[in-house]
Image: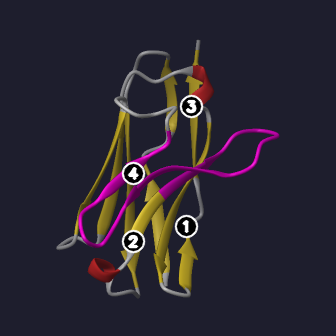
Amino acid sequence: VQLQASGGGLVQAGGSLRLSCAASGIIFRFYNMGWYRQAPGKQRELVALHTSGGGTNYADSVKGRFTISRDNAKNTVYLQMNSMKPEDTGVYYCHAVLSMREYWGQGTLVTVSS
């Protein structure tokens, strides 16, 4: 199983980035897919979740700014991040979960400068 995240980088406050996570080795459409982030010195936290049934959920801190989506034909989940803030800085991880099975991607670094 592999979750390959990409799209991280350096962006100024107010800017946008789009993260992608391509999955292989799983039946993607059955999995709930999420994006987590870990800021320096802090615990990893859930940013956004896209269920296999099409529902979405967001951390309060990103509601209205971030959008999670998925393309089951491409086995890929996306995170569109707009109006970014310095506090969005961190390593972003892709996560796949189905019942007791869960997998993590390698993380992609996002840095938002003020």
Q: Nearer the viewer, residue 79 or 65?
A: 65
Q: Are marks 4 and 2 in contact (CB under 8 Å)?
A: no
Mark 2 or mark 1: name the one nearer the start of the chain.
2
The residue mark sitting in front, 4 or 1, is 4
**Separation of marks 4 and 1 at Cα, in angstroms:** 20 Å
Q: Residues within 10 Å of mark 2 (few under 14, many from 20)?
A: many
Q: Mark 1 points at which residue?
A: 105
- Return the x and y of residue 71 as percentages of the image width and height: 21, 64
Q: Residues within 10 Å of mark 3 (few under 14, many from 20)?
A: many
**Separation of marks 4 and 2 at Cα, in angstroms:** 11 Å
- Return the x and y of residue 68 as percentages of the image width and height: 33, 49
Tell me where the magenta segment starts and ends, as one range.
35-59
State the SS at label 3.
helix
Queried whether the magenta region covers residue 54, the answer comes back as yes
In the image, what residue type sits under mark 2? Answer: Asn
Mark 4 or mark 1: name the one nearer the start of the chain.
4
Q: Which of 46 and 17 is in front in this view?
A: 46
Rendered image: mark on residue 95: none
The residue mark sitting in front, 2 or 1, is 2
Q: Which residue is at a point 59% across and 64% down the rendered structure image?
A: 106
In the image, what residue type sits under mark 1? Answer: Gly
State the SS at label 2.
strand
Mark 4 or mark 2: name the one nearer the start of the chain.
2
**Separation of marks 4 and 3 at Cα, in angstroms:** 17 Å
- Quadrant where the C terminus sits is top right
Q: Are marks 4 and 1 in contact (CB under 8 Å)?
A: no
**Separation of marks 2 and 1 at Cα, in angstroms:** 14 Å
Q: Mark 3 points at which residue?
A: 88
Q: Mark 2 points at which residue?
A: 32
